[in-house]
Image (cartoon, rainbow, N blue to C red):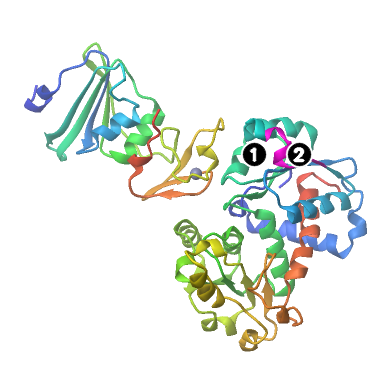
């Protein structure tokens, strides 16, 4: 995948995914060996909406490879407010860096931007669209904790607007995964996502009640249900409350169940779960650094 | 000359779009960007008797040959249409529309959060599915009412 763009989890083949995950595992096993591999290389950060965590994770990854970052800064302080198009912005910034990371509120923005630049461009989130590096770190975490072969995964929460969920579901169609989607009816998978999953021959089932599937799961991936998806507070509390878990909920699960969450969480996973062996969400967040190191090194043609 | 061909006048140079599904003529005009303010001489036949289709619509545009992008989008709403290029009163070329693998321009994405709806230099681009079209940028699928998404130029 050298000198390629990383726009959508849909573009990732099984081989491409495994190449990144294998490299990430090597980096995690021996971080010192990766140090200096990208000395003198610059990564351009173009964040058109704030995402401090993602930006920190990319910055940490680049610096641990011995490279550095140049940051466009916040939108308020940059020329975007003067009405410059995204196409123009990325054509200017590509001259400052060896690869670009883009986060932008509009869906399809990363794909469009990639058509205007020659350096590798990584999509770090395009609105409700794609966020493939989150997907790669999710896959890395699943592989480490439960394995990607013969996987039974439950994904719970806001499946309608949750792009993390959509990307992960696409990527899992490359593996033998049985995917269960648990959500209130109003927040089920959108038609376009269901279409793609069927096209890819995925094994999916939809549920409104977690207890139907919890005992079979290897992985439970929880996402947040946002208050703004509901007309009023009462309805939100009633519905969202059905999709919160605590240590008692997990008593019905297998002992080796892995519980994941893209973070930040609010109350969908109770703090008493943190103390159990199921809790994997902090490790999941940490995995972003070796995975992004591996991805950047592959894109930038690092020699081993 | 058969009876129904008399209903609309012959043109000298231009395009006759024939065998349009009945009721779609105005959408074809919209695809071509033709409205009350356009300069072209245009004849429109609606619900004209047809051997092949029962009734059909027909559009004749003087002084204009269509672009491939326009023909591609016409194929989505009028899959049986034929395009006749007329030069000096004769049909110089005649071909049926073909459903393309993708369509560019002409249509706009209905997702208002899609980058192609913003002030960017990019043209809209849709993959053509068996039963609709899909934005190559944001993934939005349009199944019904494709004609509602014709970009007003
Ligand atoms: Zn779109």
Whether the residue under disc 2 has CB within 8 Å of ligand 1? no
| Labels 1, 2: front one | 2
Q: Is residue A207 above or below residue A25?
A: below
**Mark closest to the chain's N terminus, 1 or 2:** 2
Instruction: Tell me, yes or no, if residue A203 can be seen here.
Output: yes
Q: Is residue B48 left or right of residue A225?
A: left
Q: Give the numbered dot on residue A281.
A: none
Q: Is residue A18 left or right of residue A195?
A: right
> A283 or A234: nearer the eye?
A234
- Residue at label 1? A114
Q: Looking at the picture, how far across and down is residue B1, in whole percent?
A: 9, 21
Q: Is residue B45 left or right of residue A111?
A: left
Give me the chain letter of mark 1.
A
Q: Looking at the picture, how far across and down is residue A30, in whole percent?
A: 89, 62
Work out which residue is located at the far front of the displayed protein and give it. A233
Is residue A35 one of those drawn in magenta? no
Tell me the element at label 2.
loop
- Residue at label 2? A72
Residue depicted at x 61% and y 62%? A168
Give the residues in magenta.
A70-80
The answer for how far apart the CA atoms under marks 1 and 2 are is 17 Å
Work out which residue is located at the far left of the displayed protein and give it. B3
Q: Looking at the picture, how far across and down is residue A301, in whole percent?
A: 80, 44
């Amino acid at each position: 995948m050298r000198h390629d763009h990383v726009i959508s989890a849909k573009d990732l083949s099984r081989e491409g995914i495994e190449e990144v995950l294998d490299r990430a595992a090597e980096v995690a096993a021996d971080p010192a060996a990766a140090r200096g591999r990208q000395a003198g290389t610059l990564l351009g950060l173009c964040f058109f909406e704030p995402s401090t965590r993602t930006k920190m994770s990319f910055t940490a990854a680049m610096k641990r490879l011995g490279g550095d970052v140049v940051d466009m800064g916040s939108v308020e302080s940059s020329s975007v407010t003067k009405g410059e198009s995204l196409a123009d912005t990325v054509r200017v910034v590509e001259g400052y860096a060896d690869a670009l990371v883009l986060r932008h509120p509009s869906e399809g923005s990363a794909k469009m931007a990639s058509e205007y630049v020659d350096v590798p461009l990584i999509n770090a989130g395009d609105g409700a669209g794609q966020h493939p590096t989150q997907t790669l770190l999710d896959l890395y975490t699943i592989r480490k904790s439960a394995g990607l072969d013969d996987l039974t995964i439950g994904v719970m929460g806001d499946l309608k607007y949750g792009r993390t969920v959509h990307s992960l579901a696409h990527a899992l169609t490359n593996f033998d995964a049985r995917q269960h989607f648990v959500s209130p009816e109003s927040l089920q998978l959108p038609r376009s996502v269901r279409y793609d999953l069927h096209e890819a021959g995925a094994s999916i089932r939809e549920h409104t009640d977690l207890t139907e599937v919890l005992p079979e799961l290897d992985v439970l991936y929880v996402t947040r249900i946002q208050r703004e998806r509901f007309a009023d507070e009462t309805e939100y509390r009633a519905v969202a409350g059905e999709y919160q878990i605590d240590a008692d909920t997990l008593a019905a699960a297998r002992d080796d169940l892995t519980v994941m969450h893209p973070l930040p969480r609010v109350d969908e996973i109770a703090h008493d779960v943190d103390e159990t062996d199921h809790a994997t969400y902090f490790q999941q967040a940490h995995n972003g650094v070796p995975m992004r190191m591996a991805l950047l090194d592959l894109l930038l043609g690092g020699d081993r | 000359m058969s009876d129904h061909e008399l209903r609309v006048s012959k043109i000298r140079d231009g395009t006759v779009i024939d065998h349009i599904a009945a009721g779609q003529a105005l959408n074809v005009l919209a695809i071509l960007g033709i409205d009350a303010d356009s300069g072209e001489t245009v004849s429109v036949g609606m619900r004209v008797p047809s051997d092949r289709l029962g009734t059909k619509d027909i559009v004749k545009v003087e002084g204009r040959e269509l672009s491939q992008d326009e023909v591609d989008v016409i194929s989505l709403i009028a899959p049986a249409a034929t395009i006749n290029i007329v030069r000096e009163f004769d049909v110089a070329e005649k071909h049926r529309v073909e459903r393309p693998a993708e369509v560019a321009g002409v249509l706009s994405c209905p997702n208002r959060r899609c980058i192609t709806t913003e002030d960017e230099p990019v043209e809209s681009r849709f993959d053509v599915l068996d039963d609709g079209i899909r934005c190559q940028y944001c993934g939005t699928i349009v199944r019904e009412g494709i004609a509602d998404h014709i970009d007003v130029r």
